[in-house]
Image: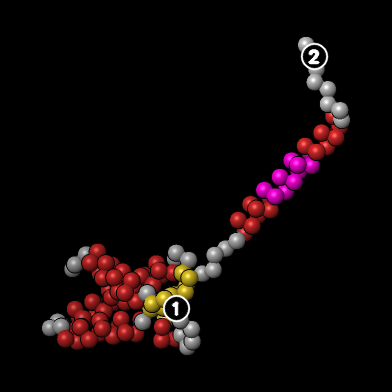
């Protein structure tokens, strides 16, 4: 069997080693950038005073005793607090719209109202 003889075997090994090292460095740089790059947080606002105001108006119009209104108010406030916490748990920054002085941010009030309603429906009735 005849052996293939390269004119400069050390040169070929040097080129292969250099290419392998360059590929490894490029891969390491790409992985480092991909791992350390954080997306900017998404900022949303909720009109919390308006949302709670609607509930207070409905509670005032309801034909219920003070104890029932107090229990409903407590349940509503707990649901609102839990909903805002959940909304902030997925990487969003939730700001109260009344406290935002400048800049535009996505209004997430409908989502907040939907979450509160879902939580109130899941709560067992007494």
Quadrant assignment for the C terminus: bottom left
Could you tell me residue 73's position as x and y percent?
26, 79
Quadrant assignment for the N terminus: top right
Distance between the alpha carbons at the discs numbered 1 and 2? 74 Å
User: On the picture, is 89 further left or further right than 61?
Assistant: right
* Front residue of this view, candidates 43 and 9: 9
Residue 45 located within the stretch drawn in magenta: no
When the figure is inspected, residue 14 is found, relative to residue 29, above or below; the finding is above
Highlighted range, magenta: 17-27
Could you tell me residue 86's position as x and y percent?
39, 67
Q: Which residue is mark 2?
A: 2
Question: What colouring method underlies this structural image?
Answer: secondary structure
User: On the picture, is 79 further left or further right than 38?
Assistant: left
Q: Is residue 79 something that shows in the picture?
A: no
* Dominant secondary structure, magenta: helix
User: On the picture, is 23 further left or further right than 121?
Assistant: right
Give the SS element for disc 1: loop
Residue 62's tag is: none
- Which-is-in-front pick, marks 1 and 2? 2
Q: Residue at x 83, y 22 (%)?
A: 5
When the figure is inspected, residue 6 is found, relative to residue 100, above or below; the finding is above
Q: Earlier in the sequence, mark 1 or mark 2?
A: 2
Q: Which residue is mark 1?
A: 105
Give the SS element for disc 2: loop
């Amino acid at each position: 069997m005849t052996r293939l003889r390269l004119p400069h075997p050390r040169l070929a090994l040097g080129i292969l080693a250099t290419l392998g090292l360059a590929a490894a460095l490029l891969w390491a740089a790409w992985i480092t950038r991909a791992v350390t790059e954080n997306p900017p947080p998404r900022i949303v606002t909720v009109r919390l005073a308006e949302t709670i105001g609607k509930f207070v108006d409905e509670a005032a119009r309801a034909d219920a005793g003070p104890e029932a209104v107090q229990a409903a108010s407590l349940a509503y406030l707990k649901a609102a607090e839990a909903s805002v916490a959940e909304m902030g748990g997925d990487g969003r920054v939730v700001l109260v719209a009344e406290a935002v002085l400048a800049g535009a941010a996505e209004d997430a009030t409908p989502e907040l109202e939907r979450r509160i309603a879902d939580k109130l429906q899941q709560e067992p009735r007494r």
